[in-house]
Amino acid sequence: MLIGIAFWVLAVIAVATGLAVFVVNSMARATYALAVSFIAVGVQILLLQQNYLGLITILMMVMEMAVMAVYMVMFMGMNPALMPMDMTHGKKTAIATSVGVFVLLAGGALLIPWPQRRGSPPADLTHALGLEIMGEKMLVMAVVGAVMVATIVAGVVLASHRTRYDRFGDDLRHRRVNDAQPGGGKQ
Amino acid sequence: MTDSGLVTVSAGWAVVAGAILCSLAVFAIALDTGLTARAQGARGGWTTIAGRFARLLRQRRRTTVAADTMLWRAGGVGMFIGAFFMVAVIPLGQWTLADLDVGVVWLNTIDVLVWALVWLTGWGANSTYSLIGGYRFLAHGLAYELPLMFALVAPAIAAGSLNVGAVAAAQDDDLWFVVWMPVAFLIYLIGVMGFSVWGPFAAAVATDITGGAGTELSAVDRLVFHAGRYLFLAAGAAFSVPLFLGGGAGPWLPDWTWVLIKTLAVLAVLVWSRRKIPLMRPDRFMTIGWTLLLPAIVVQDLVVSVLVVWKG
Amino acid sequence: MTLEAVLVVAAALFAVGLYGALSQQVIVMVMMGLELMINGVLLAAGGFWWFLAPAPSGQVLLLVILAAMTVEMAMGFAIATLLHRRRGTDMTDMAQELSQ
């Protein structure tokens, strides 16, 4: 009963803050509204007895939103003075599409006769998950690892405008790095 | 593996846990004030604490033009209550408030919230220095957080559990983790100073930007924000006890006293070290964090893993 | 709390995210929409796992979703930074050549 109430309160918070992301006028508020939405979903996952995943969802998303806020401010140049703005296109189509998708998904969720639960959760889920990704499902995690590395490399290549030749000179022999902003290693 | 022999006490005891945490924070403030007074050639100093509290409590709130009050308050209040959540999973001897199976991840989750909270405090005031303070903290965070995460991994690997009680219990008839994973302990303490915006990581609230994220804070907002930093410092020190210092293990005295004694010792070292370690510039520390601390802690984790496998 | 309830909430999150991803002009806001959609997927996956087949292997799927989210963010930020530097813009409408 208590869990049911908690679930619905969190559900309202998650969806309301999710909507707020695209309604509020301030970049910081939009970003942290999304963070609150993620925290609410993380707690819901905790209610679904998945402690580890619920917590790392909150952990990762709060961190991500803290960084996201910096990008928001950097690219949008907004101040907390709540400047009115509407940077949207094709709003009507978007609303129609998303309402349609919601009706479709929610209808499916309510109408499909879901099967009975098979099996029961392991006593120590985190431990079982660890054994799983280090055992049978290792290939999945190995692939995810490779994708992550590729992402890091690609991200740096796309985002940085200075190569090592800019930093260390044409012969790569400069002792001191020629950086406008220190902090990139080897100063 | 969640069976760690701990007794989960009823939620009412949270008041006691909160009181203990507050006392630890007051101890840290008193020690810091005393050390400051001594460095300036004065005596005592800690007698002024009550007066400072009272002054902030009855001060009138200042505000700034076009401040984002909601986010601003959220940052300050969050700093104050965050540490109380953190200590909920720390066992005091054999008692704990929440015997969470992933307590170590819980610590990490709460400490990441500080990223958001300090930045929000810096942002909400709509003031330049304040925002610079918020950015400085994020830059520090990017550098200390990953080493801290890997430092938390080391005791968890050695104990084979993420449960804080189980980590403490794993050191019972064995060497304390601090002995055979000193690098992890050191980096953990660096991380604690990081998420408490303390000592070398106080650049976000440093005097060169007139108090940084806390510049525009006044009255009770100022009190809760800075009290929150001390509370986080105390909570971080308390967490190091089950993770690295054997939990309640110790001769003669009951185990809960040992937890408190060790916590006080770690806290005292953290407070004392503030005037021994220079302030880290965020850009400099970025290099240190990624090229020195991160490889060091990964090697430490590897050593711990190999030892654990080798011991069977 | 039933599976249907979880799925309806997840569907709502997904739909809100979809609206954002379709309607927003600023790349970072589009990314927030995508994040919200994945948020819904994550909740749905957690619900399916708990109510239908609570075996440890199902949890791996949630880990993969989280990983996908980080990859999306990292690439989004990188492209946004690149566009901002080259064009001084961060609007999707001005990045037409990405579609060519």
Image (cartoon, rainbow, N blue to C red):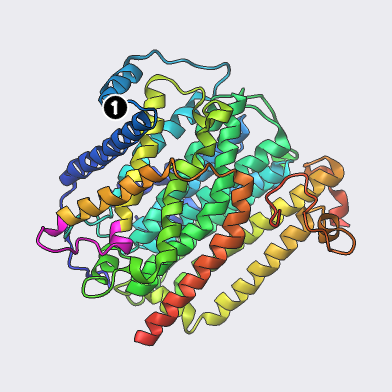
Across and down, in percent, residue A95 comes to 65, 42
The type of residue carrying mark 1 is: Arg
Viewer-nearest residue: A140 or B169: B169
The residue lying toward the viewer, choosing from B143 and C87, is B143
Chain ID of residue with mark 1: B
Q: Callout 1: few (<14), some (14-19), or many (20+) C-alpha neighbours within 10 Å? A: few
**Which residue occupies the extreme front position in the image?**
B41
In magenta, the rendered stretch is B241-256
Give the vertical position of B223 relative to A18 (above or below): above
Q: Is residue B60 visible from the viewing direction of this image?
A: yes
Q: Residue at x 21, y 45 (%)?
A: B17
On the image, which quarter does residue A164 sit in? Answer: bottom right
Is B19 above or below relative to B220? below
Residue C34, x across and y down, in percent: 63, 52
For disc 1, the marked residue is: B43
Above or below — where is B168 with respect to B44?
Answer: below
Q: Is residue A172 magenta?
A: no
Q: Is residue B151 left or right of residue A187?
A: left
Is residue C11 among what the camera can see? no
Measuring from the top left, give residue C57's x and y in whole percent.
45, 76
Q: Is residue B251 left or right of residue B304?
A: left
Residue beneath the point at 40% across and 25% down: B221
- For the N terminus of chain B, the quadrant is bottom left
